[in-house]
Amino acid sequence: MRPPLLSTAAQYLRPPKIYHLYELQRALLEPLAHLAGVSAEALRHPSNPLSALPHVRALGASQALFHRLGKRYPKQPWGIDEVKTRGATVSVAEEVVVAEPFCKLVHFVRRSEDPEVARRLAADPKVFVCAPLSGHHATLLRDTIRTLLQDHDVYVTDWLDARDVPLAEGIFHLDDYVHTVMRFLRLLGAGSLHVVSVCQPTVPVLGAVSLLAQAGEATPRSLTLMGGPIDARKSPTEVNVLATRHPYSWFEKNMIHKVPGPYAGKGRRVYPGFLQLTAFVMMNPKTHWKASFRYWIDAHKGESGAAAREMHERFYDEYNAVLDMDAAYYLETVKLVFQEFALARGTWDVRGVRVNPTAIKDTAIFTIEGEKDDISGLGQTEAAHALCTGVSAAKRQHHVAEGAGHYGIFSGRKWREHVYPKVRDFIRANGG
């Protein structure tokens, strides 16, 4: 869920066909990883009389770890089939409202056979969640969505992997992100809508709402901005430093590669997801190394370590599933958000129109930051209040989640127990 980063490894290793070499490596490694997975299951299976032997357990744990390190990680399903609300368990179904080349608008439809519960569900506030397009799939917000569904009618932007978008569909720019959000806001009825934006999209979403206000169109009842780089000059993190350490030309030369076949987007210039994942891991290598070692230990324990092992697998199945970003979008984000700070400086033009957040008057603004966020430093999201001067003080709120890192403000116990109740109450207080 981080803003676009650079991979340290890519600074020194940039073969002209790096994407092709990566795919060749994956093709060679995948059969071995599959074999390791089968071997691990056989060695650790309770019906195997040798599975109780220490050396066999150690070999099985090693095979399981190799399988995890070598396998491919596809996009994970949302997996939200039901939710508890109003004292009942209601079913949840995914419905694609709009399918565009680079994004789908997904509605999580809640249903109940109890007429009273159904009536109350229909009266819940409508919330539009803007998921990041910064390396991970929108499903990283699974916990965010599941929690919001307790009290809201939820929609989300589900961004597609650029490697799967044919070149005939054109190039995707940062301006296109802004206008995609604007189209969805109009479609959902901005005047009765509440928007929650997590991390990277805080900038384009604030831009979209500003442009609607400037055009005299309806704007959302409330806008919650969570852990995003509205003004990345404030409390710069390692991410911000990396973005300003090199000129724009360096990013274009070193970070952009062409998609190989057999992907539908063959020939498209992208910032590959595997480079972004490398950057993610290299920011906290010890953490990931310890997690892998802990996984080996839990796999060695057998049944007694099953719960911890499954938790590790669920997290890394999602964490390792990454997507490619269109080169234009990635490079423009680096330049405008992390190098020129265009929104904060008042110099950002979207399709020729200068973005002016002071035009926003009817939308309540809630900014949320994590005390220990190492991606978007303290003050970066709060900066939205200084830009949205047209919004009265009574309709503005800021919250710092104590002890929370970047992920903690939208996922996990801190999100569910401390942050979410404030988001829910803010929505209710502003027309929800």
Image (tube, helix red, strand yellow):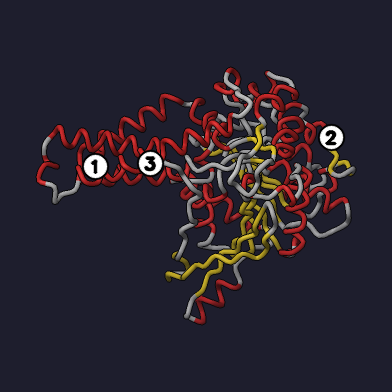
Give the percent coordinates (x, y) of residue 195: 67, 54
Neighbourhood count class around disc 1 (C-alpha, 10 Å): few under 14, some 14–19, many 20 upward: some
Residue 176 placement, left or right of 430: right
Q: Which residue is found at the position 60% from the left and 20% from the top?
A: 11
User: Mark 2 against mark 1, which lies toward the viewer?
Assistant: 1
Report the disc number at residue 117. Answer: none
Q: Quadrant of residue 399?
A: top right
Identify residue type, mark 1.
Gly
Circle 3 residue? 31
Depth check, mark 3 against mark 1: the one in front is 3
| Sequence order check, earlier mark of 2 and 3 | 3
Residue at horizontal 41 percent and vertical 30 percent from the top: 288
Please give the residue where the numbered disc 1 appears in the rendered image: 305
Does residue 30 show up? yes
- Badge 3: residue crowd in 10 Å (few <14, some 14–19, many ≥20): some
Discs 2/3, front: 3
Please name the residue shown 63% across and 39% down the image: 259
Quadrant assignment for the N terminus: top right
Secondary structure, mark 1, is helix
Q: Which residue is mark 2?
A: 346
Q: Earlier in the sequence, mark 3 or mark 1?
A: 3
**Above or below — where is 82 with respect to 219?**
below
In the rendered image, the quadrant that contains the C terminus is bottom right
What residue is rendered at 69% in x and 26% in y?
Answer: 251
Q: Residue furthest bottom?
A: 115
